[in-house]
Amino acid sequence: MENFIKEGKSGFAFNRLSSPNFYTNATKLQIALLAYNFANWFRRLCLPKA
């Protein structure tokens, strides 16, 4: 699990929430999580295993 968190922080900027507004930050985090899930799904299902 720690590797997934580290990947999210470095690749999708989970730790950078720029707005003081809670709802704006929540929306940005949800979009970043959706992008992470799509990238992870693509990597697991579509790319050949090395």
Image (tube, helix red, strand yellow):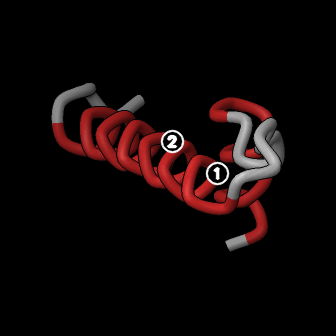
Q: Which quadrant holds the N terminus? A: bottom right
Q: Is residue 49 left or right of residue 2?
A: left
Nearest to N terminus: mark 1 or mark 2: 1
Considering every residue shown, the one lying at the far left of the view is 46
Q: Is residue 19 left or right of residue 38?
A: right
Instruction: Determine crowd level at label 2: few under 14, some 14-19, many 20+ residues with C-alpha closer than 10 A.
Output: some
At 51% from the left and 41% from the top, the residue drawn is 32
Residue 12 image point, x, y percent: 64, 34
Task: Give the residue at mark 1.
Answer: 25
Using the image, determine if residue 21 lies above or below residue 12: below
Q: Are marks 1 and 2 in contact (CB under 8 Å)?
A: no
Using the image, determine if residue 47 lies above or below residue 26: above
Q: Which quadrant holds the C terminus? A: top left
At 81% from the left and 40% from the top, the residue drawn is 16
Task: Give the residue at mark 2.
Answer: 32
Residue 27 image point, x, y percent: 48, 50
The residue nearer to you, when weighing 29 against 23, is 23
The residue nearer to you, when weighing 21 against 29, is 21
At 65% from the left and 58% from the top, the residue drawn is 4
**Could you tell me the amino acid type at mark 1?**
Asn
Which tag is nearer the camera, tag 1 or tag 2? 1
